[in-house]
Image: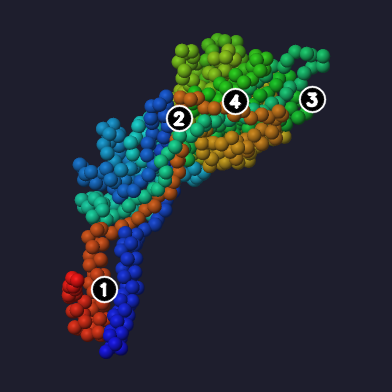
């Protein structure tokens, strides 16, 4: 009797042990039911987040965990738990402007950019045409987003096969009125990042190099100085994409090539001019040229007073037949006349034109429109050479999403380099005749197109928003090294950015795209699995113990009465 009882216990334990793998399988299936079609990962770039004097601008959030939606959704639908996907090709700017201005609730915004706008993409004629077509729309979009207080996460991504397929499915479902939710399924977009934090004490870095002139024997007077300056940093809607190929990558490239040309010229004592040449790559350009101001104030007073004039280079890579010379002093000023006539004569020899644009400085206004205005405020004669007819507004046109490599022409920069170098040389050496070309194409002093192209390609792949650059940033080290090759006494100056600007980190993330089934499907699957397990369990019990034992498993055990003593 005892043996029979032990046998039944052993059979029962075997039945339950056989159920353990099945139960584990069921739990795994339940856990994975929402992830069965998961994991497409896309790089995304967050909209800038910053404050000016405590006033918030840009995107204020970074995390995402919502279903995807498209512009095909039914009007009036609740999008507070949806990520709206907007391809730039189909962007309805009016709709987005109304949505933001009316402060309607939105789970998040994902803007899909064409691959032609990816930094470093050179492309061909069709790419250039497409990019130019997007330029105006992008400028309006960036202005809306950068100068607004956006209470939801905003990200940019580049179109690819995965995003195209996802968007096609989302549009199809939205058009049928089947908006993605937890009950209906669809695509879920997840970005898991920590909340943005303030960047403590952001720095701006200036780099200067010096080419000393030749003083006549017995001359103790300080030599006059000509400064050539360009701001190298950028600002845009997406800091991780703000490469500023034209503004102001082209100006930086032009300055480096001018430094190389005069380095060769000044390396020979016989051709060294009686002017010092000061080259400066400044930071803080988008923030009222704050780096230029601090660099100028850091100069020795005698040095600052020795500056004959300064030429600032800004956006010289996308023009055809005319460059503009922007000045603050009146056009009839003797120094301004001399600078402009020098440029005009060289431009005429090179087959294009320059025009003079005068804009008076308002000392009471803290806004600095052009870099040369920082010189003018310190009573130093200066001018800005640029293709831009008017100065950009604060935090605009300083590295926008459309300012990419394919919009900048190497030939335009080379013409700008020749204009600056020839006009400086004629001034330094006193050669005002039009038939003289010191930097002729067939000479040892010719502009090097390879150098121009190489630096332009590098800058067009390197975001340069100053608050996100460290003091030892590889780009800063590379610029310093380049100036050291061409000039002497190279120095680096680190300064704190003006306290009215506050920036936040988290500029880039990974977007996980999950295709999830509906809850109805989940419940149906669980019901089928549960039914299968019950049938299997019953079969095993019947075959090992009989029907009576199966029924006994579901009977209520008899209560035991406790005898009272």
Q: Is residue 553 visible?
A: yes
Q: CA distance from mark 2 to mark 3?
A: 51 Å
Could you classify mark 2 by the number of other residues whose Cα lies within 10 Å: few (under 14), some (14-19), or many (20 or more)? Answer: many
Which SS class for mark 1?
helix
Q: Which residue is mark 2?
A: 502
Q: Nearer the viewer, residue 423 or 77?
A: 77
Query: Which mark sits nearer the N-terminus, 2 or 3?
Result: 3
Residue in view at x 34 percent, y 42 percent = 109
Disc 2 and disc 1 in contact, CB within 8 angstroms: no
* 117 displayed left or right of 424: left
* Residue ID for mark 3: 270
**Mark identifier at residue 139:** none
Alpha-carbon neighbours of circle 4 within 10 Å: few (<14), some, or many (≥20)?
Answer: many
Between label 1 and label 3, give the one nearer the viewer.
Answer: 1
Please tell me the numbered disc located at residue 229: 4
- Left or right? Give the position of 102 relative to 355: left
Residue 544: x and y, percent?
27, 85
Q: Secondary structure at mark 4?
A: strand
Task: Please name which of the two marks, 1 or 4, marks the residue nearer to the observer.
Answer: 1
Residue receiving disc 1: 533
Q: Earlier in the sequence, mark 4 or mark 2?
A: 4
Q: Image quadrant of residue 89?
A: top left
Q: Earlier in the sequence, mark 1 or mark 4?
A: 4
């Amino acid at each position: 009797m005892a043996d029979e009882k032990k046998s039944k216990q052993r059979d029962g334990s075997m039945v339950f042990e056989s159920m353990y793998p099945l139960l584990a399988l069921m739990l795994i299936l339940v856990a994975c039911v929402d992830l069965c079609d998961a994991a497409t990962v896309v790089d995304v770039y967050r909209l800038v987040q910053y404050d000016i004097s405590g006033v918030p601008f840009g995107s204020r959030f970074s995390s995402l965990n919502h279903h995807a939606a498209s512009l095909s959704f039914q009007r009036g639908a609740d999008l507070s738990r949806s990520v709206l996907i907007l391809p730039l090709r189909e962007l309805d700017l009016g709709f987005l402007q109304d949505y933001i201005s009316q402060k309607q609730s939105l789970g998040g915004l994902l803007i899909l950019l064409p691959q032609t706008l990816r930094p470093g993409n050179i492309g061909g004629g069709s790419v250039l045409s497409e990019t130019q077509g997007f330029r105006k729309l992008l400028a309006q979009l960036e202005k809306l987003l950068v100068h607004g207080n956006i209470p939801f996460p905003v990200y940019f991504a580049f179109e690819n096969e995965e995003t195209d397929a996802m968007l096609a499915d989302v549009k199809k479902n939205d058009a049928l009125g089947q908006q993605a939710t937890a009950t209906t399924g669809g695509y879920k977009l997840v970005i898991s990042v920590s909340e943005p934090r303030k960047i403590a004490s952001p720095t701006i870095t200036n780099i200067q190099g010096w080419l000393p002139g030749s003083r006549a024997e017995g001359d103790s007077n300080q030599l006059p100085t000509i400064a050539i300056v360009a701001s190298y940093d950028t600002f845009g809607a997406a800091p991780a994409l703000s490469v500023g190929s034209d503004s102001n990558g082209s100006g930086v490239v032009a300055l480096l090539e001018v430094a190389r040309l005069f380095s060769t010229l000044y390396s020979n004592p016989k051709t060294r001019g009686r002017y010092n040449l000061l080259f400066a790559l400044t930071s803080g350009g988008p923030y009222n040229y704050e780096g230029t101001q601090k660099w100028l104030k850091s100069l020795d007073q005698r040095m600052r007073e020795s500056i004959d004039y300064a030429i600032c280079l800004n956006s010289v890579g996308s023009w055809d037949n005319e460059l503009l010379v922007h000045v603050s002093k009146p056009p009839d000023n003797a120094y301004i006349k001399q600078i402009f006539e020098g440029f005009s004569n060289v431009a005429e020899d090179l087959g294009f034109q320059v025009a003079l644009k005068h804009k008076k400085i308002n000392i009471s206004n803290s806004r600095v429109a052009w870099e040369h205005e920082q010189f003018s405020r310190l009573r130093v004669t200066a001018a800005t050479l640029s293709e831009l007819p008017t100065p950009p507004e604060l935090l605009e046109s300083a590295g926008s999403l459309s300012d990419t490599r394919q919009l900048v022409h190497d030939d335009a920069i080379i013409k700008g380099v020749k204009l600056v170098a020839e006009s400086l040389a004629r001034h330094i050496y006193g050669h005002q005749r039009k038939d003289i070309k010191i930097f002729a194409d067939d000479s040892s002093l010719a502009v090097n197109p390879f150098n121009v192209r190489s630096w332009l390609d590098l800058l067009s792949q390197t975001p340069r928003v100053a608050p996100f650059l460290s003091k030892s940033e590889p780009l800063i080290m590379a610029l310093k090294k380049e100036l050291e090759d061409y000039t002497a006494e190279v120095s680096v100056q680190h300064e704190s950015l003006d306290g009215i600007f506050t920036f936040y980190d988290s500029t880039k993330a990974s977007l996980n795209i999950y295709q999830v089934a509906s809850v109805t499907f989940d419940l149906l699957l669980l019901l089928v699995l549960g039914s299968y397990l019950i049938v299997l369990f019953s079969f095993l019990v019947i075959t090992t113990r009989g029907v009576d034992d199966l029924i006994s498993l579901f009977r209520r055990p008899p209560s035991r009465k406790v005898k009272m003593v």
